Amino acid sequence: MDYLWAFIVGGLICVVAELLLCYTKLTAARILTIYVVAGVFLTAIGLYKPLVDFAGCGATTPLTGFGYALAEGVKKAVDERGIFGALTGGLTATSGGIAAALTFAFLAALAFKGKPK
Amino acid sequence: MIPIYKKDYKKYAEKTAQKSNVLVCCIKAFLVGGAICTFAQWLYNMFITRLGEENTRLLVPVVLIFLTALTTGLGWFDKLAKHAGGGTLVPITGFANAISSAAIDSKNEGWVLGLGSKIFTIAGPVILYGTLASVIYGVVLYLLKLAGAGGA
């Protein structure tokens, strides 16, 4: 069952982006930014966590899930160390993903031919 | 009158074509995006029994990011993304693709101001506004806590 809901919820989140691409002039970069901020906001008002519990990776894999990780990280850090947690929580929770994306991108740039200058 | 009529017809035809295209695009985005999330769930279920929750939550996106960087370099990812649109853009694969394609495309412009800065062309805004939103949320949480503690 968890596969089915991951497929449906993940697919639907992608369809929303597809509709934004078709009907608005939003660029891909703007849509990604909107998704992350929306993920933080939806988590903050308590709507995203139930979706994650329900759909698992269907909710965490889209970039809204990146926002969810940021918001959850901040919440945990503020509980633990107060106002300082507001600064450390988000990036701490997402540091692994960001470091991996930068590292693999750099390795890909080393391994593959770039565009001629 | 005829040219106007022709123009109207062209407009109408374009509109209808766009409508059916949107439907096809949405179905493709749904199937590809859903498949990526299902694959992520499969990875999650594989890892969770051996690695525990914290490591699994890290490793699932890392595997997706690795596969994206590899297929971006090989040129396969762009072919899929052309059809899938939002289906490959929105999952963490879109973020990883934006970073790795920027890195590959800009490496001939130099390592520091070429690759080093352009790697953040799309990742930069995502990280900036995501972090900003999380800091605001953290401050609000802290203030709510203070107010709650003061009231109690």
Image (spheres, grey):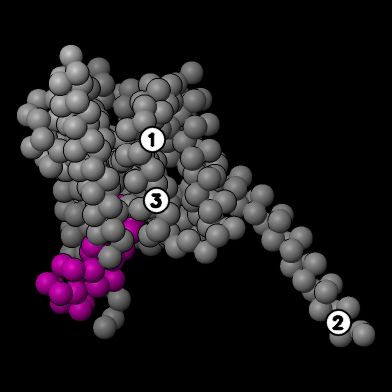
B41 vs A53, nearest the viewer: A53
To the question of a shared chain for discs 1 and 2, the answer is: no
Label 2 crowd bin: few (<14), some (14–19), many (20+), radius 10 Å: few
Q: Amino acid at mark 1?
A: Leu
| Residue highlighted by disc 2 | B4
Residue A97 seen anywhere in this rendered image of the structure: no
Q: Nearer the viewer, residue B122 or A103?
A: B122
Q: Disc 3 marks which residue?
A: A34
Can you give x and y, in whole percent of width and height, for residue A96 in the image? 17, 41
Name which residue lies at 26% across and 25% down: B47
Residue extent of the magenta highlight? B96-120
Residue shown at the point (20%, 43%) measured from the top left: B135
Quote the CA–CA distance across marks 3 and 2.
41 Å
For the stretch drawn in magenta, the main secondary structure is helix
Chain assignment, label 3: A
Helix, strand or loop at label 2? It is helix
Considering only vertical position in the picture, is A111 above or below A87? below
Question: What is the chain identity of the residue bearing mark 1?
Answer: A
Q: Earlier in the sequence, mark 3 or mark 1?
A: 3
Q: Are marks 3 and 1 on the same chain?
A: yes
